[in-house]
Amino acid sequence: MVGPVDLPVGSLTPATDTEVVNTVLLEYTERLEAVLPDGTEDFMISTGGDEIADDLAVVLSFALNATFTPIREKADRLIKKPSESTRRLVPADVLPSTFTPRLVLRAADVEALLAFTTSLLALNRKVYEQAMRAMRRIVTASERIAEDPTLAYTDYVAALESLSADTVVPDSGWDRYPHEKKKILDPVLAKLPEEQTTEMRSAILKADKAGIAARYKAFMDSHLRPSFFREEAVGVVRPVTGAALPLLVAQSYTTRSKSVHELRELRRETWLHAGGAHTVDVPDVGLMLTHEGLNRLARHVVRTFVQRGSTEVDRAYRWRDHLPNVIQVRLAPEFYLGHPEAMTKSTAGARAGEFFGYIIEVLAGRDEHLRVDMRPVLERIELALATHRKRVVREPMLAIYLLWHRLMEAQFHRPAPDKVLTAALTELQEPSMFAFTAGVLLGSTPPWSVDDLCDLAEQRYEDMRRRQPVELPPRVDAALWTLVAQRLRDDGAPTTLICAAIDRAVKCSPGDEDVMGLEQWFTSGRLDDLDLQALILGRSPLKRSVTP
């Protein structure tokens, strides 16, 4: 490379051209919108730029089958001439072309780089991100090839597999079904009537099409261009042949599966002393792709994927959500609990859970100042209760309303709360987590039957196993299961049921010494009266201290 190269994202300028590890200077300008869609000024003026340099290093490494990195120490570690050692490999022992020292770019290399980066940046955003993930995994695989050849091989296949998710597997006849499988199936199918035999063969072929391996093989086959067997194969040692390609692709997927699921190590014959060959005949295994062969195949297939990828603009893409060096954090409830717009019919349960957690900290004395004014939210609750009739909406709103008016001084009450409070006292008699929590925090143990308590606890446990349950403070769930255990004991239930209930209590609040202490008391058969409010507030739940 003689002079600066202008890329779509900046420019590359050579700083050295005769060193073992040559240096290029990258110059680019990061552009962010200064004004947000709502007309306000954006606080962010830069993301730091590091990720742009990292991504460009990936693209350069992939497109040029070379090694580019912003980290000098990493370059010095990777870019070395082959060692020919059997004990301490260097990357060039396995991928000599990728880690060539004193790399000099030719005009044809630069031209190909420009064409590739232009096509890449024109892609639809989803396709672009798929390509970048695959290229990043391929480059990472090449970089770790001397440290862990098996993992590197697996990563190559995983990168290609990630692109095959939407591949449509073409139909194939029974005559093309693998011979080793037909030898097992044909004798069984021959015993069936002809019509059933045809149906079974069709079902077997359809089932095979639905597999991930079938999609992977179909994707690889459909993304091979004629150049793979022509100009790209010039000078290649033991190149991949067209006839052997399906077997080699299938073998690569099998190798990846055995590595992931059985921790099978790649045979040393695959990568040791391969001499730059792209295929190798491994004893007891047969023909396999070497890392060099898989490397060339992977880069060819991803290039095809980029060339054919959709360039349709994704107008729904929210690029601000994907800015580098930006993380999304969950705000503490104090920042939004008092905002009326945060209370809706779909968020009522979540807001109640957050309010419980907040008020528990205040009642326990761990938070000395009640910094949230809920009165604007209570006004919104009054309006919502006038139109909503579903329990899942009303109960969390009523629990918040009731707790606020029972725990706060009169000066913080709503002007006319009696109607809503009456509804709360009536509707929160039915078993629910909101009724349970509100009642216990107000010092009242729910009067429900043992069957009602068990049903509530089991339903809550099932809800917690779902992806997004209503979050409640852990000790609330522990208190519920502790009450279940106590009622079961008082009802004369078998010890196994009692122990199972208190076991659930411990698992709802792991590592909680008070709850674990309750488990010991239940196991010993001696237990004082429980103070569930104290348990939820983080205090000792035993009303009297008794030495066992």
Image (spheres, rainbow, N blue to C red):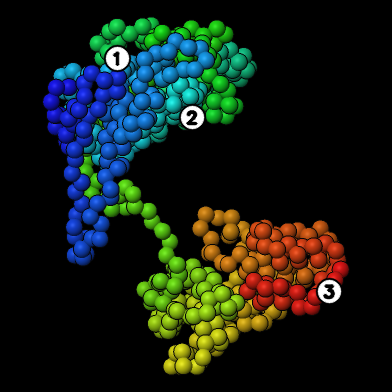
Q: Residue at x 45, y 76 (%)?
A: 388
- Compared to residue 454, the image places residue 216 above or below, namely above
Mark 2 lies on residue: 211
Which percent across, then down, holds residue 173?
A: 44, 18
Amino acid carrying mark 2 in the image: Gly
Tag 3–tag 1 contact (CB < 8 Å)? no
Question: Residue 399 lies in what quarter of the image?
Answer: bottom right
Q: Residue 228 carries which label?
A: 1
Q: In this view, does 262 lie to the left or right of 45?
A: right
Question: Residue 480 lies in what quarter of the image?
Answer: bottom right
The residue closer to the viewer here, 62 or 294, is 62
Position of the C terminus by quadrant: bottom right
The residue closer to the viewer here, 183 or 526, is 526
Which percent across, then down, holds residue 137?
A: 39, 31
Helix, strand or loop at mark 1: helix
Crowdedness near tag 1: few (<14), some (14–19) or many (≥20) residues, C-alpha within 10 Å: some
Task: Give the mark nearer the N terminus: 2 vs 3.
Answer: 2
